[in-house]
Amino acid sequence: MLKWTLQGLFLAPQQLLASIAAVAGAFVLVLFFEGVFSGESEKIVAMIERTEADVWVMQKGVGNMHMASSFVSDWKVGAVASVDGVKKVTPILYLNSVIEAGGRSWISFIVGMEAGDPRAGPWKSAGGAIVPEPGEAIVPDIFALDAGLSIGDSIWIAGRNFKVAGFSADTFSMANSITYVTLDDLADTISTIGAVSYLLVDAEPGVDPQALATKIMVQVEKVNALTREEFARRDFSIAVQMGLEIVWIMTLIGGALAVLLTGFIVYSHITGRERELAVMKALGVRDRAIYFSIMTQALFIGLMAFALAVLVLLIAMPTTEMLAPKISLGLSANALVRAGSMAIIASLLASIIPVRRVLSVDPVSAFQQ
Amino acid sequence: MLYLALKNFLYRPARLLLTLLAIAAILAEILVLEGFMAGSYQQLRQTVLQRGGDVMVSQTGISNFLAARSVLPQKTRAAVEAVEGVKTTHPLTVIMQIYEAKGRLGPIIIMVYDAYGGGNSGGPVNIIEGKPPTGSGEMVIDQALSKRYDLHPGDILTLSDYDFTVSGISANSAALFTPFAFITYDSLIDFYFESDIADDISAFPLLSFLSVETKDGADPLKVAQRISKEVPEADAMLPKSIADNDENMGRALMGPVLNLLLWLSYIIGALAIGMFMFAAVRSQQRNFGVLRALGFTSRDLIIGVIAEAVVITLLALPPAILLAVFLAALIEIYAPVYLVLAAEPAAIIRTGLIAILLAVTGALAPLQILRRLDPATAFQEA
């Protein structure tokens, strides 16, 4: 029976290949969609993770950076610095805004950092200055490439002109590219006096960040303090959950496509070999064994397609980075499990499609001319 | 030739149905993606357009309504109202908050408006349940929030330790995958003062935009130009221009990914149609052999197969549109934060033309079989 199943599959290898490719396409669509959200989500927490502050302090009631705003009175910088176990406190102003450059607009997170202190600045330079001076901005390299910006060119943030002084690497994502200016410039641009957004806290060696965060919340009024890991986890969660529904919808649409395509392939194999089926039935092979064979075919196609889809995505990740650097792709274990499960379910559902055809095959037809 | 091919297809109705269904599903998926793109851009446009007014005033240099922080000094309202041609202004404030409940974190864009301003003063325009916010602490939420967190009129929604009471649910009030909520200025002041969020209220935005109603007969564009000239801390634009800017920002943000996904869908479509035509040609190999024996050339057979693929694909288009509309409705019921405009005429025409191209490409898959087809196959045993 297994031999018959495999023979059926490899009877037309080109057709099998096209079939696997088409079903794989449905899985690629799902994995790609989820990959974009996953890649963006990873980029969204890049600043939190790469600046490596032990604790982040923000306005009470705020627990995120992405899609959130926080204001902390600037006198609290000193208050946090005086907490036992704190080595250094670096304040930043943070604003979600639109940058205009080269006649186009981009969403960007603007970080206002203290002039001359690189602590909260870009973690990787791609040329030019590393920290901005007054009136200057450090922009992501991919953004600069897309906008055709060179050192000395102008960009506009909230109507204010800044000169591009340097390029940062690893700071671009479609929803979360990071532009650095000085804290005073940003405060002036958004008319904020005496307030900062977040405090990056470096702990003394050996100090437990969680214990330090708790201590800061007890000793400094009306602030929230989170460890780097917790802060990053919350922002990652926001980003993932923003795309949760659409990823599920795309998974279902992709799954339905996979069912139909796999069902068609198995159905074609069955209709093409009805006479053989009749002979098998005449020889006493049970319907159950034939169903099992159909299911095996469907599963083979589904799993091969899934493997091909993963391979395509693994190749697409570095290729996309090279050809379309604006798009960040990620591949999470969850996505693989979800798509893999979908492949199995789709295959099993697809194997139901030709059941009626199998049932309708009359063993007598084996002996007809 | 085409007649024969279609006759053969109709001879196997189950197979034809499955093929039509599969192609329809692929085209529907393309239409849903197109609709998702169009819907996302429309959400961005309608956000500012729904706020009403003939002119929108923002902080100098801010030319977007969403994703840009605009802060206007309080005195701006009086300065704008003094400009010739301005009838009245309605203040608007936009703030971002993160809502956490039931183990889920989600962003909300809160629109603060003057509920007593009369006319369309920027509040919710499509309340489907409950009533607009009137008293302090009342909030209208988008149906996406209502669905996601199971919130209904009368329920409590807590932000930064402040309890809002849901007074109503609105539809079509979301953009950038983020639902909106609407409160009055009384609520905003109470929220700032009573919630335990910060000790310096001056840090928070109190006025983001001014929606301007112009006097009868006044040209809104000229009024906008006068405001920009006479009020140095403000820029004034027509709502349509801001809507264009927001749409362009959305295109820059989402366009690369969604276009890539569309291209991917086209490739899947071409592969799938190729697979169907490959299977169809293989199953009709003997018939094609007969045709070759009767004097039809390989070219005739290839044209026949291409025509067959095009006809089947075109037949699949109407059910694809119906399926896409059905899927769009399902998406909007299940996740109303998304707007899917699956039946946009431009998208349907574009998808139809691309579908024909995919059919022609796909029909070339069995080219080699047709070229190498020996007329003798007509006389071989099945």
Image: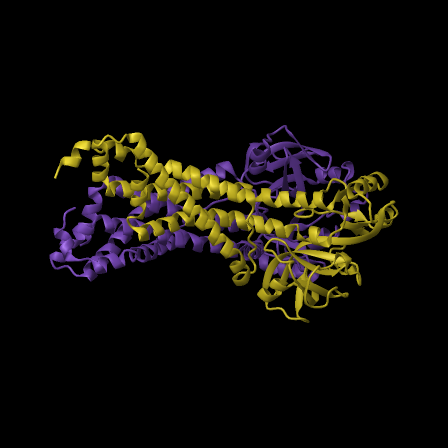
| Residue B32 in picture, x, y percent from top left | 44, 46
Between residue B147 and residue A279, name the one nearer to us: A279
Q: Is residue A118 left or right of residue A302?
A: right
Identify whether A94 is placed above or below A2: below
Q: Which chain is purple?
A: B
Q: How is the image coloured?
A: by chain
Q: Is residue A98 left or right of residue A251?
A: right
The answer to whether A182 is drawn above or below residue A240 in the figure is below
- The residue under the point 59% across, 46% down is B51
State left or right for residue B26 relative to residue A202.
left
Q: Quadrant of the N terminus of chain A?
A: top left
Tell which residue pokes out farthest to the top in this image: B154
Q: Which chain is yellow?
A: A
Relative depth, front residue between A263 and B358: A263
If the image is split into quadrants, where does the C terminus of chain A sit?
top left
| Rendered residue at 51%/41% (across/down) | A337
Q: Residue at x 59, y 42 (%)?
A: A241
Taking the image as drawn, is residue B346 in sight? no
Count of marks placed on residues: 0
Is B342 or A284 nearer to us in this picture?
A284
Instruction: Report if residue B352 is visible in the image.
Output: yes
Residue B13 placement (x, y as % from top left):
24, 40
Q: Position of residue B290 (x, y in %)?
A: 13, 53
Residue A349 place in picture, x, y as percent: 38, 36
